[in-house]
Structure formats: C-alpha cells, structure tokens
Image: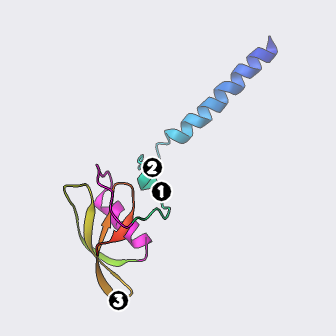
C-alpha cells in the first residue's frame, strides 16, 4: 500500500514538473518559432499566419548580423519585410512565420 501511495506521489510530481515547463507564465512567447533562435534560414519566405511582433522580427534580423533594421511591414502573405544593412550594404530583408530570415534578391 505504501509503495502504491509513493508511486502516486512521484507520478504527480513528475507530471507537475512537465506541465510547469509547458505553461511557464514567465515565458511571454508561447510560439515555438518565436522562442527558437536556431539557424533555420531559407532562401524563400514561407507564407502563413505570422505571430511575430515587429520587435521580435527585428530582433531575429539583428541576430543574423544585420543592423539599422527599419521600415518593417507585414505583407498579405504573413511575411515581415523591411530594410537593413549588412557589411555596409543596404539590403531588403524578410522574416517568415517560421522565423526564417533572408534577403530579397
């Protein structure tokens, strides 16, 4: 009986810890793409519903080595597009809903 009770308590503790990781109230960005800072860049932006804020999109662009990010606007396809500089050159940049960052060519 004590063993069953102990297993029940351990199970509750493990489940509670797992839920705390998923529902952490200090984590303001519940979107996995926003949380990810990985190098998942693509040559072409993916079209879709984009949950990045303008500030988050700008941060992702800056994380990729761009500076002076400006004029960001979300287009009808859910892609943030704007201007930035890289290595002293002005370029057109974008961020898609997956968090991919690229230059418009």
Image disc number at residue 36: 1
Report x, y in % for residue 57.
Answer: 34, 63
* Quadrant location of the C terminus in the rendered image: bottom left
Q: Is residue 11 above or below residue 24?
A: above
Disc 3 to disc 2, how far (Cα)? 32 Å
Residue at position x 80%, y 10% in the image? 1
* Tag 2 near tag 1, CB within 8 Å: yes
In magenta, the rendered stretch is: 43-65
Residue at position x 80%, y 14% in the image? 2
Disc 2 on helix, strand or loop?
helix
Which residue is at the far left?
76
Q: Is residue 32 left or right of residue 45?
A: right
Looking at the image, is mark 3 or mark 2 earlier in the sequence?
A: 2
Q: Nearer the viewer, residue 6 or 71?
A: 71
Residue at position x 70%, y 23% in the image? 9
Disc 3 on helix, strand or loop?
loop
Report x, y in % for residue 92.
Answer: 27, 75
Q: Nearer the viewer, residue 42 or 23?
A: 42
Disc 3 to disc 1, how far (Cα)? 27 Å
Residue beneath disc 2: 32
Report which quarter residue 60 is drawn in: bottom left
Report which quarter residue 47 is drawn in: bottom left
**Does the stretch in magenta take in 55?**
yes
Looking at the image, is mark 3 or mark 1 earlier in the sequence?
A: 1
Report x, y in % for residue 49.
Answer: 28, 49
Q: Nearer the viewer, residue 34 or 78?
A: 78
Residue beneath disc 3: 88
Report which quarter residue 4 is drawn in: top right
């Amino acid at each position: 009986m004590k063993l069953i009770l102990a297993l029940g308590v351990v199970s509750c503790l493990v489940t509670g810890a797992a839920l705390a990781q998923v529902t952490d109230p200090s984590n303001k960005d519940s979107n996995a793409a926003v949380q990810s800072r990985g190098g998942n860049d693509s040559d072409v932006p993916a079209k879709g519903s984009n949950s990045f804020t303008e500030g988050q999109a700008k941060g992702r662009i800056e994380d990729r080595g761009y500076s002076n990010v400006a004029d960001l606007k979300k287009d009808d396809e859910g892609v943030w597009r704007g201007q930035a500089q890289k290595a002293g050159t002005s370029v057109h940049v974008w961020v898609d809903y997956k968090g991919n960052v690229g230059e418009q060519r």
